[in-house]
Amino acid sequence: MNAFRWITLAALGVVLAVPFTRTVIAAEFVDPLSSPAVPSEKAIKGMFTGLATAGKRLVAVGQRGHIFYSDDDGVRWHQAQVPVSSDLVAVQFPSSTQGWAVGHDGVVLHSDDKGETWKRQLDGRQVGHIMLEHYRQQAVTDEALLADAQRMIDEGADKPFLDVWFANEKTGYIVGAFNLIFRTEDGGQTWLPMMDRTDNPGALNLYGMRAIGDDLFIVGEQGLVLKLEPASQRFVNVPTPYSGSYFGLTGTPGAVLVYGLRGNVYRSVDHGANWEKVELGLSSSITASTVTADGRIILVSQAGHVLVSDDDGVSFTQKPQERLGPAAAVQAVRSGSVVVAGAQGLRQLPYQ
């Protein structure tokens, strides 16, 4: 289960808990895209779903637009200024100052001051219009693409972006539900849709995106793995032995690992041409990963397991920890520990 599904289920739980207050809720509804995140000391104990480093700084994103940053490896946290209260899912900093965060309502945020303040670059109200204009300018004749763009306009800002990856301060991608994928070459000032450049005819959800060595991969539901073909600038299908959902990927220059439901992890040492299963001995879904400064690969699970590999992902050892609860993100920090984000907030843990 990834952050997208957690937040969806959490929202569903709220609806089920108060079935007779629908009219009141509708009358008091405030668009999260129009309301800034509320400063709150209690927010640090809420759900967080994404972690990244901005130089020596650690940045965490989570529900209701909350973004916090720490300059001491997660010991003390400070709340950032955020212009929306949409649930945020992922964050990445390609440099020490420039970062991007994405999440529900199709929101894309940008920071140029190490995560202290954020500005909105894109949201779901614009996505369909950008798609339709782009494909009409390109004289695209695929009626399904044009229909998808119009449907995005009609349905409004209800599609989340689930991951973000930037190669540098200018070139980056955002991916999300139902094959949503956009690329920027100017640091997010403009975004171009790439739905016509993925081998994903079923419009499956795209959950994670990372560069491993010189290869750029996307993973998604129903065993979907895509890899960018530089010559055609198309994300082509990469077959794997598993048909369940992959929630993320990680690796080192010598190996790429994809991971997901029911403890399934697969490893390739030939750029995705062949895959071997990594036996973890777990049935819990693997939800997030990080690589330490000394090259160790760390995985965390839906059940709060922390697993460490010091052999490029050939094998993993489960580290004994007090019960963490579901983990949504993990980030290695300078102190020889990791910070884990999830339903119980943010926690620093040793991994050695």
Image (cartoon, helix red, strand yellow):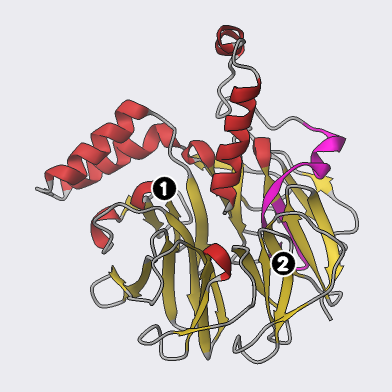
Q: Residue at x 24, y 33 (%)?
A: 150
- Disc 2, SS: strand
Can see residue 81? Answer: yes
- Quarter the C terminus occupies: bottom right
Which numbered disc flags the more N-terminal residue, 1 or 2?
1
Residue 338: x and y, percent? Answer: 79, 69
Q: Which residues are magenta?
A: 39-60
Which mark is drawn over residue 98? none
- Which quarter of the figure has residue 20? top right
Can see residue 110? Answer: no
- Disc 1, SS: helix
For residue 51: magenta?
Answer: yes
- Which quarter of the figure has residue 238? bottom left
Q: Relative to 297, is 150 on the left or the right?
A: left
Q: Relative to 341, is 323 on the left or the right?
A: right
Instruction: Judge whether 301 appears above or below 129 on screen.
Output: below
252 vs 324, nearest the viewer:
324
Q: Relative to 293, is 3 on the left or the right?
A: left
Q: How dense is the environment of label 2, judged by Cα within 10 Å: few (below 14), some, or many (20 and up)?
A: many
Instruction: Judge whether 42 appears above or below 318 on screen.
Output: above
344 vs 43, nearest the viewer:
344
CB under 8 Å between callouts 1 and 2?
A: no
Which mark is drawn over residue 177? 1
Q: Residue at x 67, y 64 (%)?
A: 301
Which mark is drawn over residue 331? 2
Q: Residue at x 26, y 39 (%)?
A: 149
Instruction: Judge whether 119 appears above or below 24 on screen.
Output: below
Amino acid tagged 1: Ala
Q: Relative to 36, is 41 on the left or the right?
A: right
